Amino acid sequence: MSDQQPIEKVVIIGSGPSGWTAAIYASRANLSPVVYVGVAKQDPGPILPGGQLMLTTDVENYPGFPEGIAGPEMMMKFEEQARRFGTRVVGEDIVRCEFSTDGTPHTLHTSGGSVIRAYAVIVSTGATANWLGLESEMQLARNGGGVSACAVCDGALPMFRDQPVAVIGGGDSALEEANYLTKFASKVHLIHRRDALRGSKVMQQRFIEKPNATVEWNKVVEECLSAPDDRGTQKLTAIRLKDTVTGELSELPVKGMFVAIGHTPTTKFLKDSGLEFDDAGYILLKSRSSRTNIAGVFAAGDVADSVYRQAITASGMGCQAAIDAEHWLGDMGLN
Ligand code: NAP
C-alpha cells in the first residue's frame, strides 16, 4: 500500500436501500463517498449488488410510488440519484476489514486485490433470507412465480388475493407472515417440520384462531410445482410435501409460498474486525444511532436490524449513518 494513496472520507459497503440512501446523503454533504456494490453473480458473493430488492418483484409499500415499482428498478433509481451527486461506484466486494481504534484510517481489502483506506466506513451489507435450497424454489422466486421470502413485501399482490398460500417455518417470522397473509389469501397453510411451533404463544394463538388459517404439522417441502400462465411465465401451482414422521408424500395446491425460516446477516467478511454483534450475528449499534463499537464505523439497514427489515426502514438507517458519519468526521476535523 502506497502512502500516496488518497484516504477516502467515506466508504459505503453494500448497495441496497440503506447503502444508496447513505450515498445520497453523504454525496450531498460533499463527502465524496465511494460505494462498494458487490460482485454480481459471484457465488458465494458476500454482497448482493442492489441487495434483497433485486430478488423482489413489485414493491408497493415504499412511499412515493403509488403504482408500485419493481425492486430492481427501484435500486437503479436509488443508484442514479446517488451518482447524480457525485457518488463513485465500484463493482467489487470488500472481503476483509482492518478497523483501527487509534483514529488512523481504516483499511479495507477488496475482492479485486486492492487495499483502500477510509476515515469513515458505513456497513450496509444487509441480510439474506434463508431459503430451503430447492432449485424450483429459487427459479420461481427470481421470476415472480409466486415464491417469496417476504410476505409484507409481496403478500398483498393481486396474484395472491383470495388464493391458497403456504408459509414455511415455525418461528415468530413465519407466524407474523402467516397472520399478515390471512388478510388477503383464501387459506393460509403454515408448514412446519415438527409438531410444535417455535414462535411465541400469543402469535400462535393469533394465527390459529383465524378462520382461514391451518397448520400442516411435521411437513417439509420437497418440490415447488409450477405451470406457465397465459404470458408463458412459470407460476407456482402446488408444493410437494413430505411427512417427516411417516415419509408420506402429498401435494398441496397453493398459488404462493412464503419462506420464513430465518435470515442471515451479511457479516462474514467482518470476522475478526473487532466489531460487536448480537447473539444472532447482527451488528450492535449504540442506542438511537448508527454508531458501532468502533469509532468511525457505522452500520445501517438489515445488517444491523433483525426486527423491521423493510426497504423504508433500511433507507432511514442509511440516512442516519451518513449524518452520523458527517458529524463524526467534523468532530475529528476531517471534514
Ligand atoms: P427462528 O425463530 O430461528 O425460526 C425459524 C423457523 O424456521 C423455525 O421454526 C425452524 O424450525 C424453521 N426452519 C429453519 N430451517 C428450516 C428448514 N430448512 N426447513 C424448514 N423449516 C426450517 O427465526 P425467525 O422466525 O425469523 O425469528 C428470528 C428472531 O426474530 C426470533 O428471536 C423471533 O422471536 C424474532 N421475531 C420476533 C417477531 C415479533 O415478536 N413480532 C417477529 C419476527 C421475528 P425449528 O423450529 O424446527 O427449528
Image: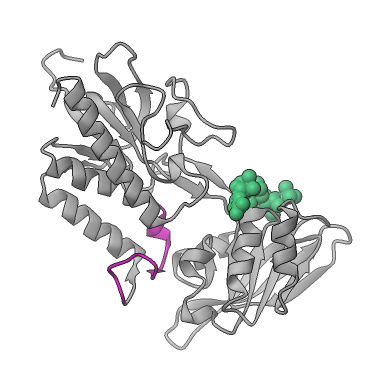
Q: Residue at x 26, y 49 (%)?
A: 21
Does the magenta run of residues contain 317?
A: no
Q: Is residue 44 visible?
A: no
Image location (x, y in percent) of residue 236: 57, 75
Is the residue 248 above or below the residue 131 in the image?
below
Q: Is residue 251 visible?
A: yes
Is the residue 283 above or below the residue 62 in the image?
above
Please state if 334 lies on the left or on the right of 267 as rendered. left
Q: Quadrant of residue 55?
A: bottom left
Q: Residue at x 24, y 18 (%)?
A: 105
Q: Residue at x 20, y 23 (%)?
A: 331
Image location (x, y in percent) of residue 134: 60, 58
Per the picture, the main secondary structure of the magenta-coloured stretch is loop
Seen from the viewer's position, the closer of residues 214 and 55 is 214
Please state if 268 lies on the left or on the right of 175 as rendered. left
Q: Which residues are magenta?
A: 49-66
Please state if 170 lies on the left or on the right of 230 as rendered. right
In the picture as drawn, the residue positioned furthest to the right comes out as 246
Seen from the viewer's position, the closer of residues 334 and 125 is 334
In the picture as drawn, the residue positioned furthest to the front comes out as 288
